[in-house]
């Protein structure tokens, strides 16, 4: 907390040629970005999207509408440039990379960042998803990936069949929000599939009691969720804006915040997803996302769509005229 | 209506590598843009922002927190590149032009588009704002400006001290929504100023009975509102997406739709403004805007922030892989 900086930021915003407060949430966002960078002239020129892909043992319980091989197929789609995340990233000038955090099958591709923690997690309905040692390694790999490069903002996305199940369990253990509230249709379960998923998750959750954050991640997290949590911590500690995507990214953000309190100062929640549990998770965090577009795709797509708002907010601070510089009269 | 095209559009969207409907409102937007252009491969490469500036005789009633000279001062700020609209337009790759639709004082600047309808309107609290002949000329000038160039999307903005008063009166006459619901603080009136403004507008509205759309615009509209309505018609008839900004632009959109039914097919409502009457006006039109960021600046700033969403939606149609092309498995 730096009250002098806060006052300076407020003065810059209020001096711009517009009625007081007329840019609403863009002003709030600009102030946050300025505080994060410790300046009244924040820079938002470069954004990267890192997509973490991994598989989930709990997929064996039939919790997803899509087969597990889709994780690898979609990773190849990202690498070929054909997924929604690629299209949005190209359109919005964001650089994208894909990390294998532990898919069921290894993929040999020169552009794929290899950080495999294993061939998917264990089935967390019956056993810990990963060991504490593996979790520590995933978090450390994530921290390094979040801290490298020179981006002003980092968006994180994910791909992993069954990962709304992992996210539900992680959020449940971290927040105490009920499984029933958090369980959603993921990629498109019907009513029967949703009921069955909920029963599996209730059973998985009952396997353990209250858990500290790291244990919750090790017991239930996917490799991609753990690595993303690490990356969020790494990026936040490097004072980069962390653009938080949807339900799964919010599970990672909740874990990151629990493991490294204070890193939430860097979090910009991009959107409210249509996945059932996201609104409750956001509310638990006191987060009001920028967009509400009924997205439920993941991959970082919602985070990408929020990036232009960060750019506009920073540009307002640095490029807009003041009443004084433009010779515009104030209120009568 | 072209059911075969609609089916083709739906098939393209549903074939993309994502769960059915997972891109939510981006999919709805993409389908609208595709229908507007009559193709499954809509193009959203170029967007322009045209800002119409004009003065209002009703400013003499003390309905604004800012003095009238701010209209010209802000027009000069636009021309110098220092306003919020300029900053957002540069950041988001949108070309901006400024039109003098009738400011109180003429401005001599090579980049200013001269379409002066007079030195501000008459005071509509006591007399018609403009003659029917002037209205016809303003609409015609607007149509030509909306139709020229080769943009895929046209955003329109405005500047004019007291123009929330003009917009309130136009929307009131076109929709029947009460003055009390529609009257807001504009650039920042306090409670006493808001009461006084409401009283002025009630008096102005009582000067006439029910009015057809053109008469409502002539009696109460600003030159910038009338010209913007014409521009929206011209752009829509050229099958361009019309990105509708806030409260004043919505008054123009309502008038455009009343004068040229069908042109609303081109309208994309960008955001819900914090100006009090905007939510009611949008609801009256059955419009659900894309953004909700507590903006209340005008100038087209909200429309600019929505532009990246249009680009992303069109790019989804044209650049994203299908399940078939990417070899990704479907639902089990």
Image (cartoon, coloured by chain):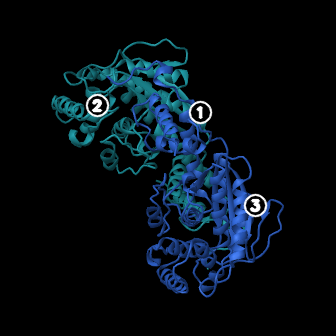
Chain colours: A cyan, B blue
Dot 3 falls on a residue whose secondary structure is helix
Q: Height in image: A180 above or below B88?
A: above
Q: A156 or A91, which lies in front?
A: A91
Please provide percent x and percent y for residue B86: 68, 55
How far is disc 3 from disc 2 in space, using C-alphas? 54 Å
Quadrant of the frame with the C terminus of chain A: bottom right
Find residue A18 and report its image quarter. Answer: bottom right
Dot 1 falls on a residue whose secondary structure is helix
Q: Looking at the image, is mark 1 or mark 2 earlier in the sequence? A: 1
Please provide percent x and percent y for residue B278: 48, 66
Q: Residue at x 42, y 12 (%)?
A: A106
Q: Are marks 1 and 3 in contact (CB under 8 Å)?
A: no
Q: Are marks 1 and 2 in one subunit?
A: yes
Dot 2 falls on a residue whose secondary structure is helix
Does residue A201 appear left or right of residue A271 in this picture?
left
Q: B45 or A99, which lies in front?
A: B45
Does residue A254 appear left or right of residue B302 in this picture?
left
Chain containing mark 2:
A
Q: Is residue B105 visible?
A: yes
Find residue B114 and report its image quarter. Answer: bottom right
Chain containing mark 1:
A
Please provide percent x and percent y for residue B178: 44, 76
Q: Residue at x 16, y 34 (%)?
A: A209
Q: Residue at x 37, y 37 (%)?
A: A256
Q: Are marks 3 and 2 in contact (CB under 8 Å)?
A: no
Instruction: Give the labeled residue for mark 3.
Output: B79
Q: Residue at x 63, y 48 (%)?
A: B239
Graded by Cα atoms within 10 Å as few (under 14), some (14 to 19) or many (20 or more), the crowding at tag 1 reads some
Q: B224 or B229, which lies in front?
A: B229
Mark on residue A90?
1
Instruction: Give the labeled residue for mark 2.
Output: A165
């Amino acid at each position: 907390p730096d009250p002098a900086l806060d006052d300076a930021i407020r003065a810059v915003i209020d001096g711009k040629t517009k009625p007081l407060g007329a840019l609403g949430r863009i002003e709030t966002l600009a102030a946050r970005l300025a505080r994060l960078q410790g300046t009244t002239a924040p820079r938002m020129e470069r954004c990267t999207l890192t997509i973490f892909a991994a598989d989930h043992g709990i997929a064996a319980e039939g919790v997803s509408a899509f087969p597990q091989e889709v994780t690898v197929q979609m990773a190849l789609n990202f690498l070929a440039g054909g997924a929604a995340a690629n299209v949005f990233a190209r359109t919005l000038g964001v650089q994208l990379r894909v990390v294998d955090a532990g898919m069921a099958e290894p993929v040999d591709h020169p552009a794929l960042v290899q950080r495999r923690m294993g061939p998917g997690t264990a089935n967390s309905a019956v056993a810990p998803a990963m060991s504490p040692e593996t979790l520590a390694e995933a978090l450390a790999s994530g921290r390094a990936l979040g801290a490298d490069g020179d981006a002003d903002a980092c968006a994180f996305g994910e791909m992993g069949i069954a990962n709304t199940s992992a996210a539900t369990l992680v959020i449940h253990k971290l927040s105490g929000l009920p499984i029933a509230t958090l369980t959603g249709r993921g990629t498109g379960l019907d009513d029967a599939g949703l009921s069955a998923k909920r029963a599996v998750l209730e059973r998985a959750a009952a396997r353990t009691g209250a858990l500290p954050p790291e244990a919750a991640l090790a017991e239930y997290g996917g490799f991609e969720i753990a690595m993303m949590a690490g990356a969020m911590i790494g990026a936040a500690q490097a004072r980069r804006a962390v653009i938080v995507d949807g339900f799964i990214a919010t599970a990672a953000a909740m874990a990151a915040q629990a493991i490294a309190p204070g890193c939430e100062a860097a979090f910009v929640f991009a959107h409210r997803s249509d996945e059932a549990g996201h609104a409750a998770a956001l509310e638990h965090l006191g987060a009001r996302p920028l967009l509400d577009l009924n997205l439920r795709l993941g991959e970082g797509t919602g985070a990408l769509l929020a990036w232009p708002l960060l750019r506009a907010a920073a540009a307002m601070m640095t490029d807009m005229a003041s009443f004084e510089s433009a010779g515009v009269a104030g209120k009568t």
